[in-house]
Image: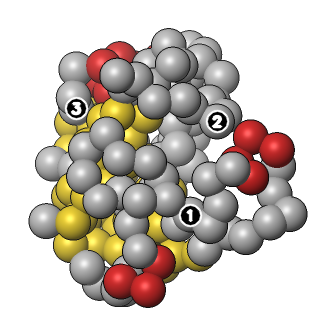
Amino acid sequence: MASQAPLTPPLDATNAFFWEGARQGELRVQCCAETGRLIFPPRVRSPWGAHAEPNWTVVCGQGAIWSFAIPHPPLIPQFSALSPYNVILVALDEDPTLRMVGNLVSCVGAAINSFDPEEIQIGARVRVVFEETDAEFPMPRWVLI
């Protein structure tokens, strides 16, 4: 059963390939055509090679928790019922300076408030999973390895 997606990002030409990858269970990020550096979030142009349109690459979808926060009310209404929940920042294995924001969940399909915040550790190894939601595309979440 698909879970509710409290808020979803807009789908546009710049991020469509990322979301198509999510549908296929792949974590895709952009890569600067001039420098080879990874780029996230998706952009029209590379910040390092401004004259080149970025390419896309599939990454392994693993990394380490670099930071985290536990939001508490008052929150935007779409997230109030889920509070407290976690928001983690993951440093990807391919480039630890490239960090992705997401939620650590206890298992595939679990709610974003399913992981005990007291158990989150900086440096813990995680991998991406893609959760089917009522949005038009699966949402990336993270589970411990």
Q: Which residue is mark 2?
A: 6
Residue type, numbered disc 1 = Tyr
Sooner in the amino-acid sequence: mark 2 or mark 3: 2
Looking at the image, is 37 positioned above or below residue 4? below
**Which one is closest to the eye, mark 1 or mark 3?**
1
Would residue 111 be seen by someone viewing this image from the given angle?
yes
Q: Is residue 141 shown left or right of residue 145?
A: right
- In the rendered structure, find residue 85 and report the number of the disc placed on it: 1
Cα–Cα gap, marks 1 and 3: 25 Å
Residue type, numbered disc 2 = Pro
Q: Residue at x 82, y 49 (%)?
A: 76
Q: Position of residue 36 (x, y in %)?
A: 30, 48
Quick one: SS at disc 2?
A: loop
Neighbourhood count class around disc 2 (C-alpha, 10 Å): few under 14, some 14–19, many 20 upward: some
Cα–Cα gap, marks 2 and 1: 13 Å
Q: Residue at x 39, y 66 (%)?
A: 115
Looking at the rendering, in which quadrant would you find the N terminus? top left
Q: Position of residue 127 (x, y in %)?
A: 21, 56
Name which quarter of the figure residue 43 lies in: top right
Neighbourhood count class around disc 3 (C-alpha, 10 Å): few under 14, some 14–19, many 20 upward: many
Q: Tell whether label 1 touches label 2 (CB within 8 Å).
A: no
Q: Position of residue 100 (x, y in %)?
A: 45, 56
Q: Tell whether label 3 touches label 1 (CB within 8 Å).
A: no
Looking at the image, is 121 positioned above or below residue 71? below
Query: Which of the two residues, 42 or 35, is positioned nearer the viewer here?
Result: 42
Q: Residue at x 80, y 66 (%)?
A: 73
Q: Position of residue 25 (x, y in %)?
A: 21, 29
Q: How is the image coloured?
A: secondary structure
Q: Which residue is mark 3?
A: 26
Quick one: SS at disc 3?
A: loop
Residue type, numbered disc 3 = Glu
Name which quarter of the figure residue 119 lies in: bottom left
